[in-house]
Amino acid sequence: FDKSSEDLENALNRNAQVPPKKQHEVDEATNTLQTARRSFRHISLDYVLQINVIQAKKRNEMLQFMVSLMGAQSTFFTQGFDTLNSLDAYKKQLAEQLHQLVLNSARDKRDMEQRHAAIKQKDVFYDDLVVEFNMEAPNGVVMEG
């Protein structure tokens, strides 16, 4: 293509520089110019055809890649969906275990609060029953009453 382009350019320059008085050189330059133009047109059409073929091939390859990518993504998401569906029973089992754990935890908390309240009550009761020791009493305990 580049060579044909240069040949056409040279033929145009030569045709422009030919003196009009020399008819033989004018005819020769005109014939050379026409031949260069025909050659350039044919080569240009071949070049454009090759470019279009390459672009169409690239476009087809790109579309093929996109279709392949979409198929791969579809397969990936379908397998993920199937896997998650197969885990439904396991999720339900975990939810039940978690619910049982929450109930046990609440029961243990309630039991500990009750024990704590009972221990506090006993501490207050024992604090009221202060026993005085006296070394002069026969058994060391002072009895009032």
Image (spheres, rainbow, N blue to C red):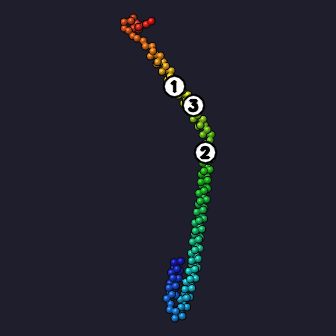
Q: Residue at position x 60%, y 62% from top?
A: 63
The vertical placement of 133 against 8, above or below, is: above
Q: Residue at position x 55%, y 88% from top?
A: 30
Find residue 49 and report its horizontal and vertical position in percent. Answer: 59, 73
Q: Where the C terminus falls, by quadrant?
A: top left
Q: Which residue is mark 1?
A: 113
Q: Residue at position x 45%, y 13% from top?
A: 129
What number is the disc on residue 84? Answer: 2
Q: Amino acid at mark 1?
A: Glu
The vertical placement of 66 against 14, above or below, is: above
What number is the disc on residue 105? Answer: none
The vertical placement of 45 against 25, above or below, is: above
Q: Nearer the viewer's eye, disc 1 or disc 3?
A: 1
Q: Which residue is mark 3?
A: 103
Classify mark 3: helix, strand or loop.
helix
Residue lying farthest to the left in this orientation: 136
Classify mark 2: helix, strand or loop.
helix
Q: Earlier in the sequence, mark 2 or mark 3?
A: 2
Q: Residue at position x 58%, y 79% from top?
A: 42
Q: Amino acid at mark 2?
A: Leu
